[in-house]
Amino acid sequence: MLMVDEQRTHHHSFGRHSHEADAREAIDFIDIDGKLSVLDIGGGDGVYSKEFVRRGFEVTLLDAHDYNFSELNSMGIKTIRGDFCNYSGHGYDILFMAHVYHDLIHDCRERVSTNIKAIGGRYVAIIDFTKEGIQFGPPKWLRIDKEDVIRDMNSIGYILVRSKDIQNQYILLFEKMPDSQ
């Protein structure tokens, strides 16, 4: 989980990863090949990171908690204990966020945009919850409409490449505009 504040992380445990098939489907949808580097922001148990590694990507998982770091390191996944709101790394081709963008926007909106832009990955992939159907996931007030995510990303030089609605969730893939620095 990405949040340092333990009281706010309770909602992450509901429906975050129903099974590994979800990770395979998400990575299939992203459909980027090559020996690219991925920063899995708030990657928690690493279910998405593991799938990226299976496909030959170089993966780093950034999370506020190191509960799974030993297992992930043994699989070739680099790990960094930290909070994206205060992260200053760079050099990744793909920034990947599954079910954390809504928290980041509520916790440190300006830093999120600054950090994404500074890291400068060619791609940004975001999976998050829709405001409809709240059988699992964060409370409705915390969720971010995908149109707002698209607007946020456009404002820092990323364009939407493709989008898919999944049951109570969406996945968005952005690519950096060629003239963005």
Image: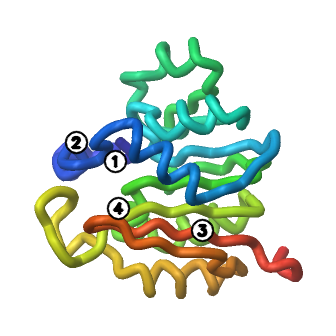
Question: What is the secondary structure assignment of the residue under circle 1?
Answer: loop
Which residue position is annotated with label 4? 103
Type of amino acid under label 1: Met
Say whether disc 3 or disc 4 marks the residue closer to the N-terminus: 4
Q: Considering the image in quadrants, where does the N terminus appear?
A: top left
Circle nearer the viewer, 3 or 1? 3
**First in sequence: mark 2 vs mark 3:** 2
- Residue marked by disc 1: 3
Image position, residue 10 (x, y; %):
17, 47
Marks 4 and 2, how far apart at CA? 13 Å
Estimate the spatial distance between the alpha carbons at disc 3 and disc 1, rounded to whole Å. Answer: 23 Å
Residue type at numbered disc 2: Glu
Specify the amino acid type for callout 4: Asp
- Quick check: marks 1 and 4 in contact, CB under 8 Å? yes
Where does residue 101 sit, x and y in percent of width and height?
42, 63
Residue at horizontal 54 percent and vertical 66 percent from the top: 111
Contact (Cβ within 8 Å) of mark 1 with mark 2 = yes
Query: Do the residues bearing badges 2 and 3 touch, measured as CB atoms within 8 Å?
Result: no
First reached walking from the N terminus: tag 1 or tag 4: 1
